[in-house]
Image (cartoon, rainbow, N blue to C red):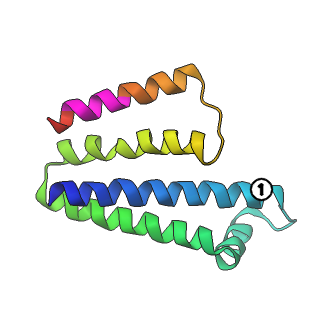
Amino acid sequence: MKWLLLALVVCSAVLGDLLQSREMKIAGRDAGKMPGALRVLQLIAQRRYLLLGIFCMAVSFFAFLALVQTEPISFAVPASAGSFVLETLLAKLWLKERLSSRRTLGTLVVLGGILLVAR
């Protein structure tokens, strides 16, 4: 059960972050004159993928709560960092972000830490 919950935490966090980033980048290009917080509320109402991203983040949050009910936090937090690795990879492939060698190395270090904790 812990691996299923962990997969749900990671996958929903990754999808939520990617959708949120994509939608906010699009909104940034189309920025209006409305101030920050009001603009975000307007975007949430108008952009269905941003709303889906927020929903995914909520799923991740509640799945994480369920995970820490049954597993030690010393496992749950480092293992859920798998989202950083997956997000970095998908940001490069899907969002076409540029990854520096430092960022790539940092991601590999995080991956190494996850593998140590998972064993």
Q: Is residue 95 above or below residue 113?
A: below
Q: Which residues are magenta?
A: 110-116
- Is the stretch drawn in magenta largely helix, strand or loop? helix
User: Which quadrant of the structure image shows residue 2?
Assistant: bottom left
For this view, does 79 lie left or right of residue 24?
left
Name the residue at 79% across, 64% down. Answer: 35
For this view, does 41 lie left or right of residue 29?
left
Amino acid tagged 1: Gly
Where residue 64 sits: x, y (%)?
A: 28, 59
Residue matched to label 1: 28
Residue furthest front as drawn: 93
Where residue 79 sits: x, y (%)?
A: 26, 43
Where residue 105 sits: x, y (%)?
A: 46, 22
Near-viewer residue (56 or 36): 56
Q: Is residue 49 above or below residue 87?
A: below
Q: Is residue 31 magenta?
A: no
For this view, does 62 lie left or right of residue 48?
left
Q: Is residue 28 above or below residue 82?
A: below
